[in-house]
Amino acid sequence: MMDKVIAVVLTYNRKELLQRCLEAIQAQTRPCDDIIVINNASTDGTLEMLNDGSFSDIKIYTLKENKGAAGGFNLGFRVAYDNGADHVWMMDDDVIPEPTALEALLEADALLEEKRTPRSYLVSMAYSEAGRLTNLPYLSEWHKNHWPQYLEHGLVAVGYSTFVSILVPRRILETYGLPIAEMFIWGEDAEFTLRITREAPGYLVGDSKVAHVRAGTGGISILPETNPARIAYYSHFIRNNIFLARKYKTRRRLGSVLCSNLMLVLKLLLRKEPGKARVVLKGMRQSLYFSPRAESVHADYDDSCIELTITAPHEGRSATPSHDNDDRKLVLVSHSSSS
């Protein structure tokens, strides 16, 4: 019996990209057993697009307010687990998988299983629209000793990674829990993959390829930012970056991160951008008491702010779960379970 693979796509106000992403998922040579969309309070007609008849058998979990990428990924892994996933294939809406992307991930997993090689996740090779490699995972010092082991098979052992086409086994969620929703935006993927690779690396799969349509051309920086709403979000980036350094890096590395942020404040003041400097200082101040813990996949959660919509099934198939299919839109009763 084949493992159950559930694809999860997080989306926010990018319905055209979401449509391309879902079309690519539905065109996989190894079909997904379920597709879940986490709609992070989109206001651009995303839900209407999903229900216009173009897509069938898709479960859409709509948040009534934007919980950030971290909250969306947290919910995505949780509901995929609750829906019985053996593997969760997670991505953003700007990821366009090639037709064999999932098949290659599963073949790599089967090879590692045959070799009795522990692994925490598998991740695709991501390319920008211009064809440049992007979102490359990082090799930690420990994993550098192992990276050539399966090079002939196109597999490289890696440390932390992004959620750009990542395949996470059910057992990993059971052991290590979920992404930290409180991080809100930036760094939740790094924290999660750092946490789950403590005992076994992830693997970059060379034969699994995706296009990352909205991939950035450089690192995250407040310096060139002009959008006031995005500038305000940078306090999360500063706070989360310090939190990660404190939790996973050496004291020396933590000191380096703190010093670089202080230098950034000075640079912003010299550029006569005191508003941005205050945002950086706010993030540094918040990091002093920011110490969230990862939730168990079995933890109770508030589902009152989530609505589930299921698109109409293909002819001859019944939608799941087994509620009245004429009532497509409902408020979740509960997806909680006790540990």
Image: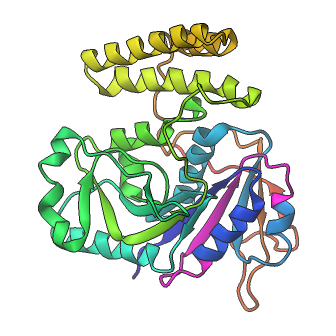
Q: Nearer the viewer, residue 285 or 55?
A: 285
Is residue 222 covered in magenta? no
Q: Magenta: predominant secondary structure element?
A: loop
Residue 60 seen in this snapshot: yes
Position of 88 compared to 13: left or right? left
The quarter of the displayed image where residue 3 is located: bottom left
Q: Is residue 203 above or below residue 153?
A: above
Q: Position of residue 337 (x, y in %)?
A: 56, 47
Residue at the outermost front position: 271
Position of 318 compared to 36: left or right? right
Is residue 35 covered in magenta? yes
Q: Position of residue 285 (x, y in %)?
A: 54, 8
- Count the marks: 0
Q: Position of residue 339 (x, y in %)?
A: 47, 42
Q: Quadrant of the N terminus?
A: bottom left
Q: Is residue 264 above or below residue 224?
A: above
Q: Position of residue 173 (x, y in %)?
A: 42, 50
Over which residues does the magenta segment extend? 26-46
Q: Nearer the viewer, residue 94 or 292?
A: 94
Residue 301 seen in this snapshot: no
Q: Residue at x 63, y 45 (%)?
A: 72
Q: Nearer the viewer, residue 26 or 310?
A: 26
Q: Residue at x 59, y 60 (%)?
A: 213
Q: Residue at x 79, y 67 (%)?
A: 50
The quarter of the displayed image where residue 259 is located: top left
Q: Is residue 338 above or below residue 124?
A: above
Q: Residue at x 74, y 56 (%)?
A: 14
